[in-house]
Amino acid sequence: MFLKVSNLKKMYGNDEPIIKSLNFSVKNSEIISFIGESGSGKTTFLRCLAGLEEVDSGKIELNGKILNDSNTLIESHNRKIGFVFQDYPLFPHLNVAQNIILNLEKKYKLNLENILELTNLNFLKKRYPHELSGGEQQRVAIARAIIREPDLLLLDEPFSNLDSAIKSQIKNEIKRIVKDLNITTILVTHDIKDILEISDRILIFKAGVLQQYDTPSDVYCKPVNCYCAEMLGKLNPIVENHKNLFIRPESVNIVQNSDHEGTVVKSIFSGKEFLLKVLVGDNYWNLYSKNSYKSGCKIYLDFNKEDLIDFPENCKGFFKV
């Protein structure tokens, strides 16, 4: 494996560990997304990988080289890891090209024109940060991180400061750039749509413990517990044969007749479709429809049995510890 993390543990003082015995590996050129609630240890883990935080125990190996174990600690500037921080600060008195090559070793300055072209910044290289959009500033920060030819690229909330109009474009550009350069990438984000579209695999974190690590389709359709299921989107509850079953909103269809009858509570236009909030028995369901329905309207719902998600009875709030 290109990146291997073994039994990693991180504590602050005598408090409960913020990262508990983390084990996972990443293949070369994969894009891995870390998700979890605030305070779950995602950004701390990125900082541990980058060498900006010391770990209490465990081992980190990158491209066949030990970065961290009981006998080894490679300093951050020697790890060949690029880190794009959430606020991607740029120097206001330097133009795009100058920001990218600032404090850069001479051998890497030869990469400038290629990196400018790859990140679509070649026509902006003489502009200053205040003359750039948020998306353009982010591309500068990414260019600055990848010009040193890192083995690993870390992105902390790369889409949080972008408006929805350019987020999709930037997301696709980031994926194109790192795939073109075959850079192994780990990103932290809260936007579920981002990670489902951009990731090769998704790692879900809860209180410093890895909950699930799998492909986007398996994490979404086959979550290992309630926490993972709820992290990736809404669930509609179904009580059937005394079992706790759930169905995703997009798996529910409106039909002429079925055993599942509901009453429309609200219909919200969301662009290409309507989000319906429907009372089914004692539970509220969410589903999507091309048509709007008036409040109080009766509708019938159906779904495929294979789309059902089954959890144990104590699933509410259930997660690995």
Image (cartoon, rainbow, N blue to C red):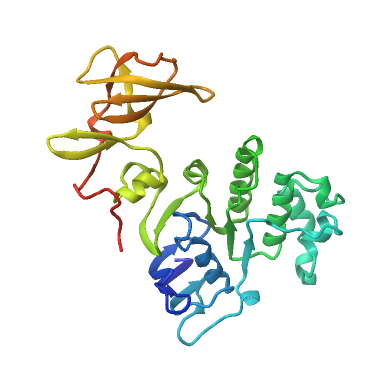
Q: In the displayed structure, would residue 133 be above or below residue 271?
A: below
Q: In the displayed structure, would residue 19 be above or below residue 245?
A: below
- In front of the other: 245 or 182: 245
Residue 285 location, quadrant: top left
Q: Is residue 124 visible?
A: no
**On the rendered image, what quadrant is the N terminus found in?**
bottom left
- In front of the other: 207 or 15: 15
Position of residue 172 measured from the top left corner of the image (x, y, whole percent): 60, 42
In the rendered image, the residue lying farthest to the left is 241
Position of residue 199 measured from the top left corner of the image (x, y, whole percent): 49, 49
Q: How many marks?
A: 0
> In the shown orientation, is residue 233 left or right of residue 301?
right
Residue at 59%, 61% in the rendered image: 153
- In front of the other: 277 or 62: 277
Position of residue 208 measured from the top left corner of the image (x, y, whole percent): 40, 65
Position of residue 98 measured from the top left corner of the image (x, y, whole percent): 83, 60
> In the shown orientation, is residue 296 left or right of residue 194?
left
Residue at 31%, 19% in the rendered image: 263
Residue at 59%, 57% in the rendered image: 155
**On the rendered image, what quadrant is the C terminus found in?**
bottom left
> In the shown orientation, is residue 121 left or right of residue 190?
right
Residue at 85%, 52% in the rendered image: 128
Q: In the displayed structure, would residue 62 be above or below residue 256?
A: below
Q: In the displayed structure, would residue 247 be above or below residue 29?
A: above
Q: Is residue 60 visible?
A: yes
